[in-house]
Image: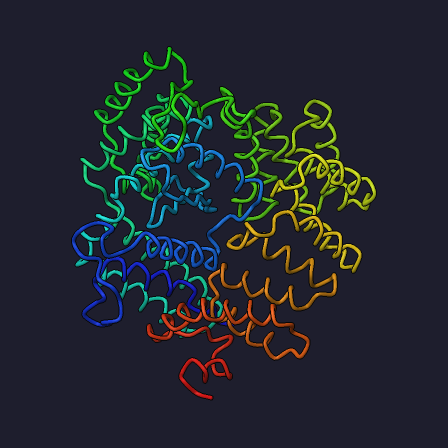
C-alpha cells in the first residue's frame, strides 16, 4: 500500500511562512516585513506544531517518555533563564544519527540523536539548546523565513512534486523514494531558510552562553562541543557522506568562533565565582535574587539533571536500525573495554526490545543493587519483570513508585502501556486510574493519548477511547483520519450531551488542517472518497 502524503502539511506550512505561495493561493497569509507583526505568536506555534506532527508521521521523531522528560527538563531550564522566559518552547528528539539540531517557528526545537551521542556531558547538549533557543528569542528564525521567501517556493514545489511522483510510482520502492525525496527537500529547505548570517550566529553564541551560565550550566560547554564537531570533521575527511555534520551546514564553524566562545565564557566565570553556578537571575518573571540553577529543583547539580548518561544510551538503542544491531554495537564496545553502568543499562534496554528478557533482567538486577533509587533503572526492571511473566513483582514495583510520584509522566505511561498489553478489563481500569492524574495537561501529548486510548478501549469505554485515538491520529500528522474517527463517533446513539459537545469542538478545530491538505491537491488515500470527502467538498 502506498503511503499517504504526510509531509504535505509541513510543506504547506513552510510555504505559508515563507510568503512565497501568495501568488498562487491568495488565502495564505503574507508574513510582511516586520518579524512577528503579521504572523502572530499563535500562528507561529500552529506552524511549529504542524512541523512536529508531520515529522512524526514520517517516522523521524523519537517519542519516548523518559527521553522526552529529560530533554524537556534541560530545555525548559534554559528557556526560563533566557531573555524571553515568556516564550513557549517544545523540545523533541529525532532518531537520525547525524549531528544536527534546529529551531523552527513557535519555539519548536529538534535535536538529532547523533548530537546527543556525540556529546560527552549534558552541558554540551545544553550549549546547543541554548544556541537554538537564542535563535528563537532573537527572532532569527522568523526573520530568516522572511528573507528566504523568494527562494523557498521552488524548493517546496520540487519536493512536493518528487513525493507525489513517488506515491504514484507504486511498488515496494515507493516508500523509500518518498523518504529520500522528503529528506533531500527538507535538507535543502532548512539550509536555505535557516542559514543564519554570521551576525546571527555571533548573537546566538553570545546570548546562548549567557543563558547557559544563568541556568547553572558550564558556559565553556558550547566551545567544548564546537571542538567535538571539529574533531568529527577531521575524522571524516575523505568521506564525502559524512565530511561535514549537518549542524555545520547551517551553523558554520571557524577557529575564531571557538575562540570567541571561550573568551565570552571566561568573562562570565569570574562573575559566577569561578563555578557553573549562576548568580541572581535577571529573569523578569522571577523575584529578585531567586536562583534558577543547580539545586533549585532539589535534583539538579553539577551534572545537570543527572540523567544524561542513561539518556544517551537509551537514545543509542532507540536510534539503532534494530535492537539486534544495538546489541551488536554494545558487544563491539565491550570487546574494547568493560561497559560502564550507563552502557550496561543501554545493553539491557536493547535486550528488552529484542525480547531477550532473561538477559535484560539479569543486567538490570545488578544495576538496581548499585543504583536502587534510580527511576530509569526501576522502570526498566519493572518492564523486564512483566515481560518475564513476573507480573505480581512488576505491579508491586510500579505501585510503590506511583505512590511516591503519582504525576510522573514517564512512570505513569510506562506502567499504563504494560497494563494495556494484558488486554483485560481489570488492567484497563487500572491503567485509566494510573493516567488520570495526568489528564487536563496532556492534550497535545501523543504517547499519553495513545496510552489513554488503549486503556479506555480495554476498560470498556469506547467513546473516550475513540476520542483519544482521534487525538492521537491528529498529533501524529493524520488530521483527516482524526476527522473520520470523530465523525464515526458522532453516529453513536449512546453519546451524552457533553461527549457530543467535545467531539463537535474537535471537529471544528481539526477541519481547517484537512481543508489545507485539500487546497494543496493532496488527500489521505486511506480515508478519501467516503462520506467525509463529500462533506468537505460541501456535499450532504
What residue do we see at 65% from left, 72% from top? 496
Give me the residue at 75% from left, 33% from top. 362
Q: Is residue 132 above or below residue 184?
A: above
Left or right of 263? Residue 400 is right
The residue lying toward the viewer, choosing from 2 and 130, is: 130
* Residue 364, x across and y down, in percent: 71, 32
In this image, 128 relative to 440: left or right?
left
Pinpoint residue 421: horizontal percent, then vertical percent. 72, 55
Q: At 48% from the left edge and 50% from the top edge, which residue is drawn?
A: 61
- When the figure is inspected, residue 489 is found, relative to residue 188, above or below; the finding is below
Judging depth in this view, the residue of 522 and 68 nearest the camera is 68
Question: Looking at the image, which residue sits at the far bottom?
Answer: 540
The answer to whether residue 321 is above or below residue 372 is below
Reply above or below: 235 against 271: below
For the rendered model, the colour scheme is: rainbow
Front-most of residues 512 and 307: 512
Q: How many marks?
A: 0
| Residue 536, percent from left and from top | 42, 80
Residue 69 in the image: x percent, y percent?
A: 54, 39
Q: Quadrant of residue 83?
A: top left
Give the side of residue 241 with respect to residue 151, left or right.
right
Q: Residue at (27%, 58%) from the top-left corner? A: 17
| Left or right of 133 in this view: 95 | right
Amino acid at each position: 500500500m502506498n503511503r499517504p502524503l504526510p509531509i504535505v502539511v509541513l510543506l504547506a506550512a513552510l510555504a505559508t511562512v515563507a510568503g512565497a505561495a501568495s501568488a498562487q493561493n491568495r488565502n495564505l497569509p503574507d508574513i510582511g516585513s516586520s518579524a512577528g507583526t503579521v504572523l502572530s505568536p499563535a500562528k507561529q506555534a500552529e506552524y511549529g506544531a504542524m512541523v512536529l506532527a508531520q515529522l512524526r508521521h514520517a517516522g523521524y521523531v523519537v517519542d519516548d517518555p523518559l527521553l522526552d522528560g529529560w530533554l524537556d527538563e534541560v530545555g525548559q531550564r534554559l528557556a526560563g533563564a533566557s531573555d524571553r522566559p515568556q516564550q513557549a518552547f517544545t523540545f523533541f528528539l529525532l532518531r537520525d544519527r547525524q549531528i544536527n539540531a534546529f529551531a523552527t517557528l513557535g519555539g519548536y526545537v529538534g535535536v538529532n540523536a547523533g548530537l546527543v551521542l556525540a556529546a560527552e556531558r549534558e552541558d554540551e547538549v545544553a550549549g546547543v539548546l541554548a544556541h537554538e533557543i537564542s535563535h528563537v528569542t532573537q527572532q532569527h528564525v522568523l526573520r530568516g523565513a522572511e528573507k528566504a521567501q523568494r527562494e523557498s517556493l521552488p524548493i517546496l514545489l520540487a519536493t512536493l512534486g518528487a513525493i507525489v511522483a513517488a506515491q504514484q510510482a507504486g511498488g515496494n520502492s515507493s516508500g523509500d523514494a518518498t523518504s529520500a525525496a522528503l529528506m533531500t527537500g527538507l535538507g535543502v529547505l532548512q539550509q536555505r531558510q535557516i542559514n543564519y548570517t554570521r551576525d546571527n550566529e555571533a548573537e546566538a553564541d553570545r546570548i546562548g552562553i549567557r543563558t547557559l551560565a544563568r541556568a547553572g550550566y558550564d558556559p565553556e560547554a558550547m566551545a567544548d562541543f564546537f571542538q567535538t564537531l571539529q574533531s568529527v570533521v577531521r575524522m571524516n575527511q575523505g568521506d564525502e557522506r559524512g565530511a561535514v555534520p549537518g549542524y555545520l551546514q547551517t551553523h558554520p564553524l571557524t577557529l575564531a568562533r571557538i575562540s570567541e566562545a571561550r573568551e565570552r565564557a571566561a568573562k562570565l566565570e569570574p562573575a559566577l565565582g569561578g563555578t557553573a553556578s549562576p548568580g541572581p537571575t535577571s529573569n523578569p518573571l522571577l523575584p529578585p535574587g531567586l536562583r534558577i540553577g543547580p539545586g533549585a529543583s532539589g535534583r539538579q547539580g553539577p551534572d545537570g539533571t543527572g540523567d544524561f548518561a542513561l539518556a544517551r544510551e537509551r537514545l543509542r538503542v532507540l536510534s539503532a536500525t534494530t535492537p539486534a544491531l544495538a546489541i551488536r554495537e554494545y558487544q563491539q564496545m565491550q570487546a574494547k573495554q568493560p561497559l560502564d553502568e550507563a552502557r550496561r543499562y543501554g545493553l539491557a534496554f536493547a535486550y528488552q526490545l529484542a525480547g531477550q528478557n532473561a538477559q535484560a533482567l539479569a543486567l538490570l538486577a545488578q544495576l538496581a543493587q548499585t543504583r536502587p533509587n534510580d527511576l530509569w533503572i526501576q522502570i526498566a526492571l519493572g518492564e523486564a519483570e512483566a515481560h518475564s511473566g513476573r507480573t505480581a513483582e512488576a505491579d508491586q514495583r510500579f505501585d510503590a513508585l506511583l505512590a511516591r510520584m503519582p504525576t510522573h509522566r514517564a512512570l505513569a505511561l510506562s506502567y499504563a502501556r504494560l497494563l494495556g498489553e494484558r488486554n483485560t478489563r481489570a488492567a484497563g481500569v487500572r491503567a485509566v486510574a494510573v493516567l488520570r492524574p495526568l489528564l487536563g495537561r496532556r492534550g497535545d501529548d501523543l504517547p499519553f493519548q495513545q496510552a489513554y486510548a488503549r486503556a479506555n478501549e480495554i476498560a470498556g469505554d469506547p467513546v473516550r477511547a475513540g476520542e483519544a485515538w482521534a487525538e492521537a491520529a491528529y498529533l501524529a500528522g493524520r488530521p483527516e483520519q482524526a476527522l473520520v474517527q470523530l465523525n464515526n463517533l458522532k453516529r453513536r446513539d449512546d453519546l451524552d450531551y457533553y461527549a457530543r459537545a467535545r467531539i463537535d469542538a474537535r471537529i471544528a478545530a481539526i477541519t481547517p488542517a484537512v481543508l489545507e491538505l485539500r487546497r494543496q491537491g493532496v488527500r489521505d488515500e486511506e480515508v478519501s472518497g467516503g462520506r467525509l470527502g463529500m462533506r468537505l467538498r460541501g456535499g450532504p
